[in-house]
Image (spheres, rainbow, N blue to C red):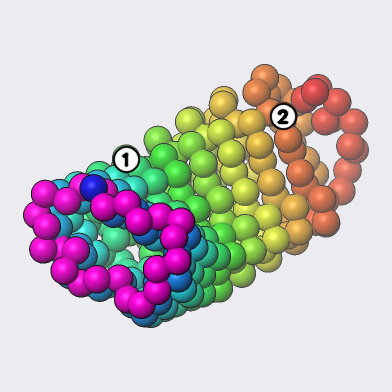
Amino acid sequence: MINLGSNNFTGQVPSWLGAFSDLQYVRLSNNSFSGEIPSSLFNASSLIEINMRYNMLSGKLPDDICSNSRKLEALFLTGNRLNGEIPANIYKCRELQDLRLPINSFSGRIPVEIGNLSMLTVLSLGMNHFEGGIPAEIGMLSELERLSIPSASLTGNIPNSFFNFSSMILMDLSNNSLSGTISIVTFHILPKIQELYLLYNHLTGVVPKEFGNSTSLTTLDLAYNRLTGAFKILCYIF
């Protein structure tokens, strides 16, 4: 393990880190590292966790991400200056359980290949500049517990495939440009949902009364949409 977190390091992330074939954890968070993430880092075949949150890293994620480091379970890159598209080869990270890329400048479409990360429990992509909608393939992630993509320029409807989320605890799609109705087909199989944030979108129609059947829901925030109909159906939730 290399843990240099919460110091005042500057300069680029050393490329030689990838030479350690037995290296499992790289923790460099809360520093001032800059430049691109060296692609050689992903040559470390035993890597389990990369944590480089809150630095000044820029450039794109390597296209060959996880080509060699296929044991990677956690990738934390929150709060940097990374840009470009999330590489489609992210699907090679078959063991990935926790993917956090918010507060960057990623653009393009969210790759549909994320739907192949069957072990994923946390997906956090908020505060980026994506194009298009939420890939329906994300609904294939049956182990997903936390989905957070607020303030990410998303458009289109909430995919009906999201009914697969039987393990979901928190979903935050707030402050986007999502439209359409809140389909109960989308949400009727969310038995563990505790927090649901859909505020600041362009959703229309009525709030499904089935939300009132939830025994776990503690926060339902639908503010600043274009919803209509009776509000009293929510009285069963709390």
N-terminal of the pair, mark 2 or mark 1, is 1
Q: On the rendered structure, is 115 left or right of 195? A: left
Q: Could you give the CA–CA distance between mark 2 and mark 1, rounded to whole angstroms?
A: 26 Å
Q: Nearer the viewer, residue 98 or 87?
A: 98
Q: On the rendered structure, is 17 left or right of 231?
A: left
Residue 6 is inside the magenta segment: yes
The image shows residue 135 at horizontal and vertical percentages of 46, 58
Image coordinates of residue 118 in percent, x first then y, are 31, 42
Characterize the local packing of mark 2: few (<14), some (14-19) or many (20 or more) Cα atoms within 10 angstroms.
few
- Residue placed most toward the observer, 191 or 160: 191
Q: Residue at x 64, y 31 (%)?
A: 194
Vertical arrangement, residue 141 with respect to residue 52, above or below: above
Name the spot of residue 26 as percent of width and height, x first: 28, 54
Task: Name which residue lies at 46% across and 56% down.
Answer: 6
Q: Nearer the viewer, residue 52 or 185?
A: 52
- At label 2, which amino acid type do we have? Thr
- Element at label 1: loop
The span picked out in magenta is 2-25
